[in-house]
Amino acid sequence: MAADRRVALLGSANLTGRALRENVEIGVVLRDRATVGHLVDHLRWLRSPTAGFMRPA
C-alpha cells in the first residue's frame, strides 16, 4: 500500500476482517523516498495493460 511517494506499507496481510483477526502476518513500513518511488513505479507498471511476466531492467 502506497499513499504517496514518501511512505509505503509492504506486507503479507489480506485486508479482510477474518484475516486480520485470525492470521499472523508481517509488514514493514518503508520511508526511504527512493525505495518507495521504485515501489510505486512498479505497482503502476503491474496495473498497466502492457505488463507481462518480466519487467525490463
Image (cartoon, rainbow, N blue to C red):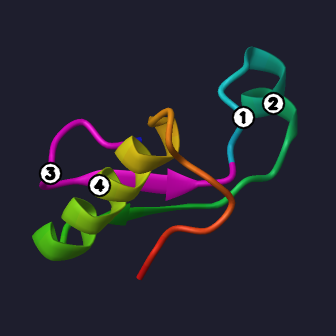
Q: Is residue 47 above or below residue 57?
A: above
Q: Which residue is mark 1?
A: 14
The magenta region covers 2-12
Residue type at tag 3: Arg
Specify which label sits upstream in the sequence, 2 or 4.
2
Tell which tag, 2 or 1, sits nearer the viewer.
1
Horizontal relation, residue 31 to residue 33: left or right = right
Mark 2, other Cα within 10 Å: few <14 / some 14–19 / many ≥20? few
> Helix, strand, or loop for circle 2?
helix
Q: Mark 3 = which residue?
A: 5
Residue 34, quarter of picture = bottom left
Give SS at disc 1.
loop
Label 4 is placed on what type of residue? Answer: Asp
Report the amino acid beneath label 2.
Ala
Mark 1 and mark 4: Cα distance apart in space: 22 Å
**In-front residue for pair 44/30:** 44
Q: Nearer the viewer, residue 36 or 48?
A: 48
Say few, some or many: other residues with alpha carbon within 10 Å of mark 1 (under 14 / 14 to 19 / 20 or more).
few
Q: Earlier in the sequence, mark 2 or mark 3?
A: 3
Residue 48 rendering spot, x and y as whole percentages: 44, 36
User: Is disc 3 surrounded by few (<14), some (14 to 19) or many (20+) residues within 10 Å?
Assistant: some
**Hey, which quadrant is residue 11 in on the image?**
bottom right
> Residue 43: x and y, percent?
42, 48
Magenta part, dominant SS:
loop
Verify CB contact (< 8 Å) between mark 2 and mark 1.
Answer: yes
* Residue under numbered circle 2: 19
Instruction: Mark 2 or mark 1: name the one nearer the start of the chain.
Output: 1
Q: Amino acid at mark 1?
A: Asn
Kindly identify which residue carries mark 4: 41
Is residue 6 left or right of 39 when viewed as pictured? left
In 3D space, how far apart are the residues under numbered discs 2 and 3 (Cα atoms)? 27 Å
Disc 2 versus disc 4: distance between alpha carbons? 28 Å
